[in-house]
Amino acid sequence: MKIAAIQMRSGLDPEANLAALEPLLAEAADRGAAYAVTPEVTLIFPENREQLKAVAAPFEGHPHLARVGEMAHRHNIFVHIGSLPVPLEDGRFANRSVLFGPDGAQVATYDKIHLFDADIAGLNAYRESATYKAGDRAVIAPLGDFTLGFSICYDMRFPRLYNALANAGANLIAVPAAFTVPTGQAHWHVLLRARAIETGSYVIAAAQGGSHANGRATYGHSLIVDPWGRVIAELDHDAPGVLVADIDPSAVVEARGRVPALANARDFSPPALQN
């Protein structure tokens, strides 16, 4: 199976973002990809709640998602929108992934579970939970000979989620992201390779890259990692582009057979200090 990671430089105008996505999806399909994943905040990349409120639309009947479904149908390809903001009743938003099938119908959705709340030295406190509401459900979906596991960006720092996805049957895990440049340079490759090694799964990470209209800068470097932890494809830059690689379910079986970490894992009691 051929899969594709689409790297973007999304801005604040959903129409412009959709116009940028269309030729990238067409290229992925022309290169034989049966599945393509886009970055986090594909359809709008906001910096604050005011920017979100200006353009976010209700999930049911969402006009831009309807257009993505049409693209999936036109190109006969699974299209995984890495995420978009969805308004909720409490005034916050869900950071939601949406998978479309080749027929253009929605197959699955996932709301980002882990939110970045941190006090960073030299910077203002960052409270993602002030704007977004965390999801509470891990999600997998059938994808041809593979089972797709869902995650979004900051999720990649929480291996328990990936272990749960793999134990539920996922052998390909998607990580749409909008990683900052400093953290990307330090952690992007090693975290994604670790999640592949720990689960014996393919990992595909579609990234935002470059300088955005909201003033943010993101790392790019979309990549695909095999179940042994090898980077088999990478966009070694932060410009928009399409990354395609062949994946084989037998490689998952081989990796999990050589290091049966999932099968060998055991439950245990929390640590206790011994005198």
Image: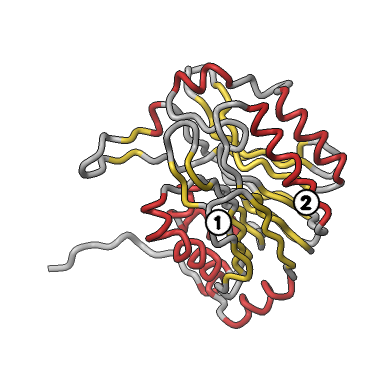
Where residue 182 appears, x then y in whole percent?
Answer: 36, 53
Snapshot quadrant of residue 88: top right
Q: Which residue is mark 1?
A: 164
Q: Which residue is mark 2?
A: 27
Task: Name the residue type under label 2.
Answer: Glu
Quadrant occupied by the N terminus? bottom right
| First-in-chain label (2 vs 1) | 2
Where residue 156 appears, x then y in whole percent?
Answer: 48, 54
Where residue 81 appears, x then y in whole percent?
Answer: 66, 41
Q: Secondary structure at mark 1?
A: helix
Residue displayed at 55% across by 32% down: 11
Is residue 259 left or right of 143 when viewed as pictured?
left
Snapshot quadrant of residue 100: top right
Is residue 219 left or right of 44 when viewed as pictured?
left
Quadrant occupied by the C terminus? bottom left
Q: Which mark is residue 260?
A: none
Snapshot quadrant of residue 245: bottom right
Task: Name the residue type under label 1.
Answer: Ala
The answer to whether 95 is drawn above or below residue 13 in the figure is below
Where residue 109 appears, x then y in whole percent?
Answer: 66, 38
Residue displayed at 40% across by 31% down: 129
- What is the crowding at mark 2: few (fewer than 14 residues within 10 Å), some, or many (at least 20)? some
Seen from the viewer's position, the closer of residues 162 and 99 is: 99
